[in-house]
Image (tube, rainbow, N blue to C red):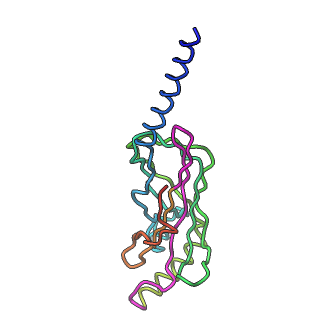
Amino acid sequence: MYAAIRTLKAIEKQAKVADATLVAQFRPKVVIRKMQLDPPTHFAFDARQEGIWKVVIQIANIGGTKAVVTDGFGYFQEYKKDYPQKDLSVGWVLGTPLTIQAGQRVDIDYILDAPTFRSYMEIIETSTVLRGKQPARSPIFHGRIRYRDDMGTERETGFGREWDVVQHRFVPLTDPEFEYQD
């Protein structure tokens, strides 16, 4: 009887190790697939007359098991190395957990303070047209997403994208303080 109990405990322990190994090997990995500003200019904002401005990011789980997104946030800021950052708008903050299955993609909207952001975009777009180049203090959208795997391990993905005023698109930053994955 004692030997049977020891054998069962050993089998349970081996099963837990096997599960942990599988999760580690096929763990979830949340990445940012695309990001867009909607609408892309203050002219388009005025033409729509909806009064809503947002950043839409698409997150994807490229790992082998589900990810449970527990929290996240995003900021739109003016940014230039060695200068203080100027907050423009706080976007999305996740309130309830979001499960993303392996291979699944999900769009998340970061709603911006439309009147403030519209004024800012008008200034930088006009300045860009007059100078013919990207402003020195670039607008960036950055933040992080935290998620959990099946074993309860917390992981984090950071993102940072610079808004290219001329091309009306986000460009990934190469700074590892912004762009990273655990």
Residue 47 position, x and y percent, is 46, 69
Q: Is residue 93 magenta?
A: no
Q: Position of residue 133 (x, y in %)?
A: 40, 87
Q: Say if 59 sits above or below 76 in the image.
A: above
Horizontal and vertical percent for residue 171?
40, 70
Residue at 49 percent across and 79 percent down: it is 138
| Direction from residue 51 to residue 126 in the image, left or right | left
Q: Is residue 158 above or below residue 41?
A: above
**Viewer-proximal residue among 41 and 84:** 84
Q: Quadrant of the N terminus?
A: top right
Q: Is residue 82 left or right of residue 166?
A: right
Identify which residue is drawn at 45% across, 74% down. Answer: 43
Q: How many marks?
A: 0
Measuring from the top left, give residue 169's x and y in whole percent: 39, 70
Look at the image and give the residue range highlighted in magenta. Answer: 131-156
Q: Nearer the viewer, residue 47 or 70?
A: 70
As drawn, the residue found furthest toward the top would be: 1
Quadrant of the image occupied by residue 170: bottom left
Residue at (45%, 45%) from the top-left corner? Answer: 28
> Toward the viewer: 172 or 166?
172
Q: Residue furthest bottom?
A: 131
